[in-house]
Image: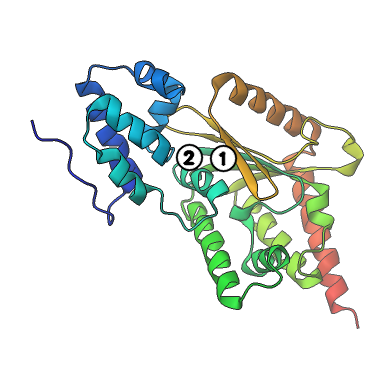
Amino acid sequence: MPGPKDLDPSSSPRALLGAELRHAREKAGLTQEELGRPLFVSGSFIGQLESGTRRMQPEYAGQIDEILGTDGFFQRNCRVSCKSRYPDHFAEAAEAEAIATTIKEYAPLLIPGLLQTEAYARAVFRAYQPTATEDVIDELVEARLDRAHLLDDPTKPLLWAVLDEAVLRRRVGGAPVMATALRHVAGLARQRRIIVQVMPFEAGAHASLNGSLKLMSFTDAPPLAYLQGLGSGQLQDDPATVTSHELTYDLIRACALSPETSLALISSVAEDYAHEDQQP
């Protein structure tokens, strides 16, 4: 039987690579757990590679070729699937986000990327890279706004965001930018496109003081958790770890204001910014 064909870069590389991995693994008579064992990864990780929710990295591709006898196929085509317009630490998370059925996020400092306006995103990237050319900033902003097209579908993915009150109070880009940005978030909530809550300062200590948290679930793959730091990110798939993060998110939601009260607060702060901008 002929071996798998090289992938066409114009198609969906990760999905095709995953389908070929499943085909080659089953042809070799291995379960996902059995293939994962010599790679020191879980069976669920192999499942995520096969479903396209995770990208195959070069170090795994070479070992998989050896184990499955696929004559360098995965190592060659891995280069195609690894191409991304996003930073390395976020690329896998962005790709998983694009096929998630549910996204739950706690944002301690900034409006989540999927909910940002152009002016807000531009202010964020300019703060990150004060000496970058306008072309570089334009490219970053375009990539971020393209991600937001996930919300063009009226029902999926389900997006549930908890914003720390600091997100509302931090003047990213100035009063006019903040007024528009918060009105945008409030508008999506009023349209029932997203669920949003605010973690008020008065809540005090809560379960995610250490940083941001994003949870993603999928139709045919195990859930993932993504933790982001300064120029770094961790995409976690260990079932026990993800379950622990899900509990953390439940605790955050329990401490936050209700969606109705949160919407009222977001709208009120937006109007405060707008009024401030109109004053002489």
Q: Secondary structure at mark 2?
A: loop
Position of residue 58 in the picture relative to residue 240 (left or right): left
Q: Quadrant of residue 52?
A: top left
Counting every numbered tag in the picture gives: 2
Residue labelled with disc 1: 103
Extreme-left residue of the structure: 1
* Viewer-proximal residue among 2 and 144: 2
x and y percentages locating residue 270 in the rendered image: 79, 62
Measuring 55% from the left and 62% from the top, which residue is drawn there? 145
Q: Is residue 209 placed above or below 77 in the rendered structure?
A: above
Asked if marks 2 and 1 touch (Cβ < 8 Å), the reply is yes
Residue kind at label 2, given as amino acid type: Ala
Residue labelled with disc 2: 100
Q: CA distance from mark 2 to mark 1?
A: 7 Å
Residue kind at label 1, given as amino acid type: Ile
Does residue 50 appear in this view? no
Q: Secondary structure at mark 1?
A: strand
For label 1, the crowd category at 10 Å Cα-Cα, with few meaning under 14, some 14 to 19 and many 20 or more, is: many
* Viewer-proximal residue among 170 and 25: 25
Measuring 53% from the left and 50% from the top, which residue is drawn there? 88
Measuring 55% from the left and 21% from the top, which residue is drawn there? 239
Q: Is residue 269 placed above or below 1 in the rendered structure?
A: below
